[in-house]
Image (cartoon, helix red, strand yellow):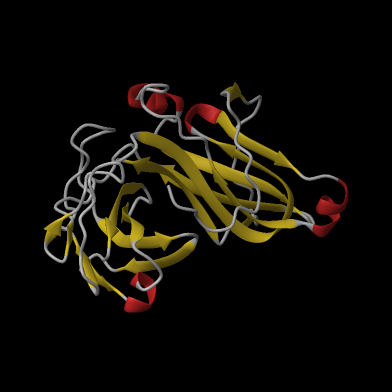
Amino acid sequence: MMARPTLYVALLTTGVLLCATSIRPVRGAQQFSEAEIFFELNHTDGDLGIHASIDGEPWTDLEIQGPGGIRLLNVVSRSRLATQGMTQLFFESADPDFEELRPADFFRRFREGRYNIDARAQEGGRIQGSATLSHVLAAPPANIRLNGVAAARSCDDPLPTVLAPVMIDWDPVTQSHPDLGKRGPITVRLYQLFVERDGVKLSLDLPPSVTAFEVPRGVTDLGRDFKFEIIARTTTGNNTAIESCFRVP
């Protein structure tokens, strides 16, 4: 899957540990300005991962607890980093394919529900927040076309050759995933589109009402073979991605 925003810290517990105490709201605690925990499905490759993005005032240690007080993550800064303080944390777990980790086992490992975040503020007091993790994933973007030609199912299949400018379009995503996670209503918050060639990448966010984009000639002039990815991001934060490739003559 294509690169995500810069990883400031990438630490994720691989086991599930029971905490001695549960995180409780602290009167007068500051609140994180951003607190998101979500799943990302690569529908094309068949893998799942869990991600988080947390931002706020400087802190020195941080803990995330899930339903039942189960610890998801514990970060403690030391020495000069503790003196400097940390403000932003983004992590992305490993995402083994479904043959190595079955989706049902993945979802049992990461229960849906409320996850509480608690940090020790660098200058005293606490910083807290919470995020709700949902097992409802969006269906993958479907009926993807390149100048009206059906996209390849993956980059390993025969690729369509299309003339620039290349219009990429797909059907609106309105349903939950038919096979993975839990069925339920979904609302797409935005689509993300990435087009990449030899490390040069076009990336943009599109509102849910927009399901088409014409790739600028300045991008397609860079070569012949291109990879693209479309992500449907729901209002609960979960991402469903699909990847393919195309060629220009």
- Rendered view: 249 above or below 11: below
Left or right of 122 on screen, residue 236: left
Residue 175 location, x and y as percent? 17, 47
Residue 65 location, x and y as percent? 56, 35
Residue placed at 40% from the left, 36% from the top?
48
Question: In the displayed image of the protein, which residue is found farthest to the front?
Answer: 249
The answer, for residue 211, to whether it is visible in the render is no
Q: Which residue is at the front of the view, 228 or 99?
A: 228
Question: In the displayed image of the protein, which residue is found farthest to the right?
Answer: 79
Residue placed at 36% from the left, 67% from the top?
205
Q: Which residue is at the front of the view, 9 or 27?
A: 9
Residue 161 location, x and y as percent? 21, 60
Left or right of 102 on screen, residue 208: left
Quarter of the rendering containing residue 162: bottom left
Residue placed at 42% from the left, 61% from the top?
197
Residue 63 location, x and y as percent? 64, 40
Residue placed at 56% from the left, 23% from the top?
16
Q: Which residue is at the front of the view, 112 or 128?
A: 112
Give the tally of numbered discs: 0
* Quarter of the figure with the C terminus: bottom left
The answer, for residue 98, to whether it is visible in the render is yes
Left or right of 214 on screen, residue 100: right
